[in-house]
Amino acid sequence: MKIAAWFVGLLLVVLTGFMLFTAGWERPPIKSEQTGYRGTGMVDVVNPRTEATMMSSQVAPESTPLPPDAGPKAGDIYENVQVLGDLSVARFTRLMQSITNWVSPEEGCVYCHNLNNLAEDSVYTKVVARRMLQMTQNINDQWSDHVQQTGVTCYTCHRGENVPQYGWFNSDPAVTPVGGMAGWRNGQNRASPEVGLTSLPEDSFTPYIDGAENIRVIGDTALPSDNAGATIQSTEATYGLMIHMSEALGVNCTYCHNSRGFSVWNESTPQRATSWYGLEMARALNTEYVSPLSSVLPPHRLGPTGEGLKINCTTCHQGVNKPLYGASMVADYPSLAKPTSGTAMTRSEPSEPASEGISVAAETREVEPDTASRAAMMPD
Ligand code: HEC
Ligand code: HEC
Ligand code: HEC
Ligand code: HEC
């Protein structure tokens, strides 16, 4: 009897030790905040201590003072400015200095320029940077449904690195299986950090934020038997994407969903509608800007399918609900807020989700989240 009591005691001590000293356990007090209807479990849980560390790593660098937009234009003075020609020389020079700080602080101007001839486009990074300038202007001008007035600058993604720390490559569809058919993983079962170290498909990005496959999988008939419903495979890919979105923002599913009805828009939070635009935006950025740039990149920048590193939610968000906790750097860089000379470009309209592979009833569902009912979704 006594031995049993000892044993139980020892076991408790060991388990407590595991609980206290291994990863995944955070000591109280933990803050929680209700974000949905009472009783639906829609709460955000944050640990004030990890949040403090996060806050110190998400600080926007200070901007230099904005010089007046007077005097000669860059387009009149320099030989080869295709995007920033309307800027005054003073503003142009300041922007060159800033992009150097944001993208190549160690290498300096030489990362993009042949210093003997700044007008030359011989360094590939300059060609990429010109397109990135247009992409940044396009995000801020055309995607305010998502980035609001906060907007983005090069720093949002690059944070002092040549290539952003977070992104993804299309996985190689032709990877040969080890041990014949039996060894074919079908792109899953290899714990991947992208999907929270689960065995879900590792590449949930190719179908949804590169291609435009249907993310929606929930049928709205009971026990659908007509073979028209979503497959388990595509459901797993949707789940993988959802885990990515949660991790990218440092939130859980209930930040966007009421778990009693994952598909129901008018019971979801406004953040879910914002995310819908985020998905459309990430897809547009990858197909219109990043993919076409692959042809100018050197081989060591390319992934297994010969394309460059692409954008996902983490590229900008890096673990928090608003990149840099919502600090707006664009306010200090008006030239990045909208297209400048010769770059007017419209956003391609979001594609309607394909109805293929999902039950007929789904076609009648709202395509765009219903914004009118957003007010009604707020907690009381
Ligand atoms: C991340 C890449 C990048 C870095 C770093 C960079 N530039 Fe540039 N630079 C560009 C691009 C892109 C253009 C062309 C802009 C356009 O087409 O509107 C350009 C154009 C110029 C021009 C105009 C040249 C001409 O005659 O056409 C000057 C001058 C210039 N940069 C100076 C600098 C200086 C000085 C630095 C360092 C403080 C610097 N740049 C750092 C990308 C860069
Ligand atoms: C939305 C995220 C995002 C923003 C904003 C962004 N970039 Fe990028 N950038 C990327 C990604 C992803 C890559 C890698 C893919 C590629 O090289 O095409 C990249 C690559 C680059 C490269 C090539 C680096 C190398 O060594 O191969 C340069 C140069 C660059 N960006 C400059 C800029 C400049 C300048 C700005 C601001 C005007 C900017 N970027 C804004 C995401 C972004
Ligand atoms: C940041 C917001 C956000 C988070 C966090 C999030 N989701 Fe989603 N979820 C969405 C959006 C937006 C869609 C709709 C995509 C579309 O319709 O194109 C969606 C769709 C879904 C669907 C498909 C609904 C349908 O109509 O078939 C499921 C299932 C789902 N999410 C589950 C989850 C789970 C489980 C989690 C947590 C692991 C989660 N989501 C986390 C935003 C989010
Ligand atoms: C180009 C950079 C960029 C990308 C890529 C991006 N976001 Fe955002 N997102 C932002 C910015 C900037 C804001 C802040 C807008 C504001 O101030 O309200 C934001 C805000 C949000 C919000 C609102 C947060 C809140 O608490 O109100 C959600 C939710 C969100 N993003 C989800 C996503 C998801 C999901 C993805 C990937 C599908 C994504 N974002 C991709 C830049 C980006």
Image (spheres, rainbow, N blue to C red):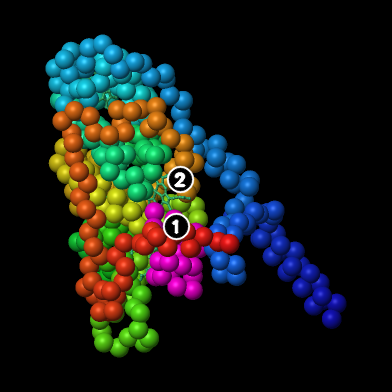
**Outermost right residue:** 2
Numbered label attached to residue 270: 1
**Which residue shows up at 16% across the image and 15% down it?**
76
Q: Can residue 170 be seen in this view?
A: no
Numbered label attached to residue 322: 2
Mark 2 CB near ligand 4 (8 Å cut): yes
- Decide which of 134, 231 is in the foreground and name it: 134
Q: Reply yes or no: does residue 136 show up in magenta.
A: no
Q: Where is residue 320 in the image (x, y as percent from the top left)?
A: 48, 47
Q: In this view, does 340 lie above or below 38?
A: above
Judged left or right of residue 368, residue 39 is: right
Quadrant in the rendering for residue 302: top left
**Which residue shows up at 21% across the image and 17% down it?**
74
Quadrant in the rendering for residue 308: top left
**Which residue shows up at 25% across the image and 79% down it?**
360
Q: Position of residue 60 (x, y in %)?
A: 46, 32
The range drawn in magenta is 254-274
